Image (tube, coloured by chain):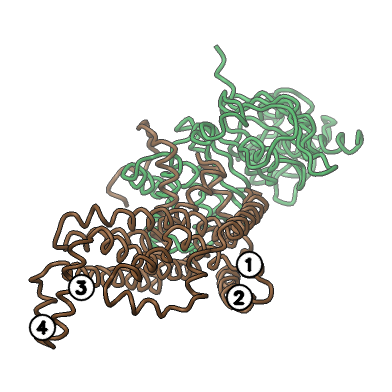
Chain colours: A brown, B green
Amino acid sequence: MPLHDIRYQHWDGVHLGLWARRLVIARNGVTACLQTKGLRHLVGICWMTGLAVTAILFLIGQLLVADSIVVQWAGNLNPQLQGIVHMLTSWLEQHPEISVRTTQNLLFHYFCIYLMRVSIFVLGIAMPFLITRDLASNAIIIYSSKAVSRWDYLLGKFSTAFGLMAVTWLGPVCAAWFMSNLLAPDWRFFWHSRAALGHALFYGVSSMAILSLLALGVSAISTKEKSTPAFWYIWWILGGVIAPIARHTQPWLRHLSFSYNLDQIALAIFQPGEDLKIAQDNIPLLGNLLRNIRPETMAALNSPALWGSIFALVLMLVLAGWVISKRVKPE
Amino acid sequence: MPPPLVIETHALTKLFGQQRALDGVNLQVGPGAIGLLGPNGAGKSTFMKCLLQLQPITSGSAKLLGREVGREGREIRKRVGYTPEQDCHIPAMVGCEYVTYCAQLCGLPFRAARQRAHEMLDFVGMGQERYRKIDTYSTGMKQRLKLAQAIVHDPGIVFLDEPTNGLDPKGQAQILELVQSLWRTYGISVVLSSHLLQDVDRICEQIIIIARGRVLVHDTLENLKARKRGAAEVVVADGHRELQAACARQQWQCELLPNGHVKVEHKSDSLNPLLRLLDELKLAPLEIIPSPNALEETFVQALEISHATA
């Protein structure tokens, strides 16, 4: 026999607002996803990479200080190397705005591209938790009978995907930027690296939004938990295979790959080609090494297929929206 | 002053292509335990789904708890509970998590939601199984869980679509007892959709019979039974033959039913003539059931009229 009263009790508290209810859906989704062991490991890998980026930026930062341990360590290895490092250091000290900005922009560009790929993989694992399971189990009826609309539900699910990528992508980027600048020898690093952070945030948030919507669309295609991740991975891998092959034959085919399109947008936002040119022209010794980059690579970096990629992504988003509108209904 | 209406519809119509699932339904229903009856495909579930906005209304208008359906969807659903006919839980969740989550979706803060979830699971009679994953539940447990999620946010009205489906007689009785208490003890209006007449007869005070998308009957159970007065089932331990013979002398139709009850058509609004006869025969009835099949007869009659006019 229960120790407490088991009669029905009326409740007269204050109801939470609409955004709180949407957040409940998102939080529940992220929590359910993170109960998957493989996904937790991937989150760990993302944060470990963030730590590695912090370490690299810490070492680069030390190059800007004449009496840093890196310079001493180079001297211990080879006196000639110490001379080269001294020369580099003195130049970098004179142009911190170029050295910090360029280095961090390049590094965060590649870091974002890497995290985007991991996040795409993560979304594949999370695919059943987005819409697939709710369609399979008719849970969509339960959502629709509560004080949330179909749009609230979709917004909650969108936030689930977005929130998951905030953990695997945006979080490590922001943490790496903050930690590396906190450990830098000069507070001005925060100021000089603002462009790198701005690019990473702009690219990160916009790409995460696009990927979230695409993932919702794929998640709504089927009610089978194995099918939707398979669709997602096949699309991703097939696009990745087609893009380099189609480069010389049918260039428009490359836009079938959403990761290719996002790469092009990354190139347009971070503009690594310009950074490489600055490095080639200004940095002593190291600049000469960078001149060995192939001209076609430099051309690809300098002129990304931005409008084609945007157009292709918009088409994909429209398609995803159509799938969602057709599939996500209470009945 | 009459109590405010809980359901109000004007020419409510729902089309699925060319087929009319609801055909100009006009209803004004006050609070209480309301039985929604009809054969399969009559439009009962569609009617409930239109009120809950799970299906868009084709034309006409509807109000639930005084609020316009279609305009104030979220606000209405904050005050409404629903147990669908089919299973529709969220997979891989444990019972108490699920009910807590449903309460949060209705706007309850987490602590209140968790507390209410446990209270409601106690109320529907779920024990430690609340900590198990829903996928492992039996049909009975799932029905209880559905009821718990429907009332966890303290609604003003609950729609129950075939809540006793798949339950054994004991489970059915327990669920019906809980549903009955919602209105009689706690004042929560209940709309019970079922094709099981005895379920509706047991707990509902108002009856709505729907067929072919139209409301055929809307009245209180008491009135329906009053229309069918003049018949009763008498339960006697012995003396069946004497009773049948006495009824024949009175020119009353009398029939011995397979369950041992004697059905008597005494043709009177009152049971007094029958009681007098039993007294004369010195028969002590164990039970007298007035208008025993009133609901069933009304239901069949309404359907026959519907078929005849179609």
Near-viewer residue (A226 or B38): A226
Q: Chain of mark 1?
A: A
Q: Which is nearer the eye, A271 or B261? A: A271
The amino acid on which the numbered mark 1 sits, given as a three-letter code, is Leu
User: In this view, which residue lies farthest toward the top?
Assistant: B1
Residue matched to label 3: A88
Secondary structure under tag 4 reads helix
Work out how far the residue at label 4 is from the one at label 3, CA to CA, in angstroms. 14 Å
Determine crowd level at label 1: few under 14, some 14-19, many 20+ residues with C-alpha closer than 10 A. Answer: many
Residue A75: numbered disc: 4
> In percent of the image, x 53 and y 53: which residue is there?
B143
Q: Are marks 4 and 3 in contact (CB under 8 Å)?
A: no
Say which residue label 2 marks.
Answer: A238
Above or below for B64 versus B141? above
State the SS at label 3: helix
Give the foreground label among 4 and 3.
3
Q: Give yes or no for contact between labels 2 and 1 (Cβ–Cβ under 8 Å).
A: yes
In the rendering, at what x and y percent does residue B119 appear?
Answer: 36, 45
Q: Position of residue B187 (x, y in %)?
A: 48, 30
* Residue bearing mark 1: A256
Q: Tell me if mark 2 has few (under 14), some (14-19) or many (20+) residues whose alpha carbon lies within 10 angstroms of its own.
A: few
Q: CA distance from mark 4 to mark 1?
A: 52 Å
